[in-house]
Image (cartoon, helix red, strand yellow):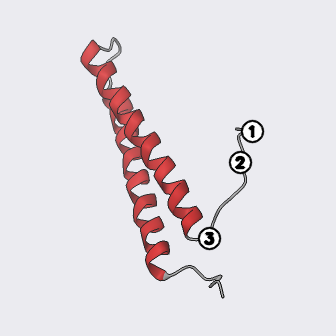
Amino acid sequence: MTDLIPPDDARETARRIAAAHTAASRDVEAFLRRAPDLPTPADIAEYAALLAREQALRDERRDAAETAGLGAPSIGGE
């Protein structure tokens, strides 16, 4: 018989990854607060790296939530 209640470790993993995604979003915000009016190539590269990290964690968060039984339909039409 399939257990419909996900194990605690799956929910904890989802919570941990959600917290990491929140931290990544805060890092993007912090960068935008200190970004110069005229960004240098280094600033642009840093911003791109921050966005990539945030996106990767968003994807990981979604996958972890689905593993924990919290799959949601797409809201972006993707």
- Separation of disc 1 and disc 2 at Cα? 6 Å
Instruction: Name the mark on residue 57.
Output: none
Marks 2 and 3 close (CB-CB < 8 Å): no
Taking the image as shown, residue 7 lies to the left or right of residue 75, namely left
Q: Residues within 10 Å of mark 3 (few under 14, many from 20)?
A: some
Q: Residues within 10 Å of mark 2 (few under 14, many from 20)?
A: few
The amino acid type, in three-letter code, at marker 1 is: Gly
Instruction: Name the mark on residue 69.
Output: 3
Mark 2 lies on a secondary structure that is loop
Image-quadrant location for residue 48: top left
Extreme-left residue of the structure: 42
Residue at point 38% right, 30% down? 32
Q: Quadrant of the N terminus?
A: bottom right
Taking the image as shown, residue 66 lies to the left or right of residue 55, namely right
Give the total number of marks visible in the rendering.
3
Instruction: Name the mark on residue 74.
Output: 2
The amino acid type, in three-letter code, at marker 3 is: Gly
Q: List the residue tagged with mark 1.
A: 77
Along the polypeptide, which appears first: circle 1 or circle 3?
Answer: 3
Residue at point 38% right, 55% down? 20
- Separation of disc 1 and disc 3 at Cα? 21 Å
**Observer-nearest of 26 and 21:** 21
- With respect to residue 64, does 38 lie above or below? above
Mark 3 lies on a secondary structure that is loop
Marks 1 and 2 close (CB-CB < 8 Å): yes
- Separation of disc 2 and disc 3 at Cα? 15 Å
Where residue 56 sits: x, y (%)? 43, 43
Residue at point 44% right, 73% down? 12
The amino acid type, in three-letter code, at marker 2 is: Ser
Where residue 35 sits: x, y (%)? 32, 24
**Observer-nearest of 72 and 37:** 72
